[in-house]
Amino acid sequence: MTASARPVPPGYLLWLAAGFVVWCSALVVLYAVHAIGCAFAWSAGPLRLVLALVLFAHLAVIGWIWRRLGRSHLGLDFGRTGAFLNGAAVWATIAAFATTIFTLSASLLLTVCM
Amino acid sequence: MHLTGLRGMPRRIYTYSGDEGWNWLNLLSSVGGFIMTIGFALVVIDLLAQLRYGRRVRRDPWKAETLEWAMPIPPAPYNFASIPHLETGPDRIAPVGLALSLARGEGYLGFARNGWQETLGVHITSGEPEQLIVLARPTYLPLYTALATAAAVLAMLFHLYLLALAAALAVAGLFVLAGQSAGLSRDYGPMPVGNGVSVPPHTEVVGSPPWWALIFALVADGVLFASLVFGTLYLWISAPNWPPAQTFAPDLRLALAAVAALVVAAAAARGSLRSLAADGMTRGWIGLAALGLVVAIAAVVAMIAAIVPRPTEHALGATAAALLAFVVLHAGVGLLFLLSNLLRLGAGFVSSQRSLDMRLTRLWLDYTLVTGVVALGLVLALPALVGMLKT
């Protein structure tokens, strides 16, 4: 950082992990809903719909984080360190968004229950 | 190997007929095995070549510009005499010049004080000096703690449960004992650390290393707790022989009493923290918190005793007992926190400036309350969940 810039608040570091925390939540909730739905023999249509809703809700949250971080002006307020952290957080969030689609969209394509 | 396992290949067989469809996957595993062996061999060859042909050099033989090359080779027993202040990135420095300046003690902490082993704690995003961390003195306590921990685990492996319990209590006692010499026994305020900078010791700041250590320990503990909850629900819908023939009816009054007692303990921890600043009834608040924990432990132990089917007979009883035992364990560790608070308060390690002990206890008891509510709620819900399986 430059000497004139204020230090970035430590709490900002949490944004680095935020996207992947939501990914974790998506994984656990999809797993749970899927297992419970199959154990109690929900019919395939409604179960698939609930799985899709859970997935899209999590994608929406990650998308919101992405938009929020993309619009923040940390670099203006906190100098080089702020700009770097902002960039790192945005890219970590994009990675989480892509990972969520890549690893979890299979729940919309595969057979619902064995 | 994961895929061959999914395709039905058992472990630890040396041959098979060859028509199971495992051949190309095993060939792939063999290729991977050779590649890994080559990797290990390269390290071994490198080690041997260094031993045979390596030449001794002074500092920074490559004229590199990164910080680690400011280190003397071989390192001095104290590693480096002072800590550098870097304005630019750590990859644009002149290591030799910096090394001499550091050796002259021109960086931070280039002097000794009070016989302390000191290091700097810095701001997490800017790197500015924030606190003077006074490290613990060399001690054999970690060794004794490790031996007692090993004894506890080994005794459990050999079914010597009383010995395991005794060793576990010894570990707990050693932790409390370690607390009797940690930290500083008076307020110091900001102290000079070199370069014209003064910072308070770690005992007088909010984000000191023990505080972060407990936060990270609780994150790890929270993952274990989430796994326990997950395991309970997993068994509920996936295990064979569910529902069991008979189901217990958890005592709602005991559960509510336990939660209320945990709330009292967490609130009393706040009281003890506030009373530090007011120089008031700190010991009374600690006693109230301990009373809350003892009541909570008694209520939850009574709940464990009433579990049917018995934990040794069916996974329902075992998971319910494990969830409740989690609460008992954390309340018990909370008692250790309180005991340590009392002892350290008496020994003068705690003041309104040095409130870390009370803040750690508050954090632990808050965590115990939150996980306790979740665990007790899940145990209360278990009979209804099991009932859903019967329909």
Image (tube, coloured by chain):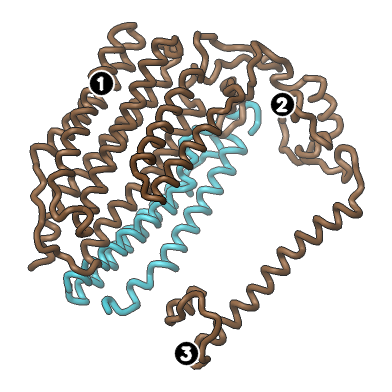
Residue visible at 41% across and 31% down in the picture: B170
Circle 2 is placed at which residue position? B83
Name which of mark 2 and mark 3 comes first in the sequence: 3
| Cα–Cα gap, marks 3 and 1 | 65 Å
Crowd rating for badge 2 (residues with CA inside 10 Å; few <14, some 14–19, many 20+): some
Q: Are marks 3 and 1 in contact (CB under 8 Å)?
A: no
Circle 3 is placed at which residue position? B20
Q: Kindly indicate the quadrant of the structure image that contains residue B293.
A: top left
Name which of mark 3 and mark 1 comes first in the sequence: 3
Q: Position of residue A30 (x, y in %)?
A: 31, 63
Name which of mark 1 and mark 2 comes first in the sequence: 2
Crowd rating for badge 1 (residues with CA inside 10 Å; few <14, some 14–19, many 20+): many
Seen as rendered, the residue at the extreme top is B279
Q: Position of residue B67 (x, y in %)?
A: 76, 37
Q: Which mark is residue B137?
A: none
Q: Which residue is at the front of the view, B274 or B293?
A: B293
Q: Which element is circle 2 on? A: loop
State left or right for residue B379 relative to residue A112: left
Seen as rendered, the residue at the extreme bottom is B19
Residue B382 vertical placement versus B25 (above, below) = above
Q: Chain coloured cyan: which letter?
A: A
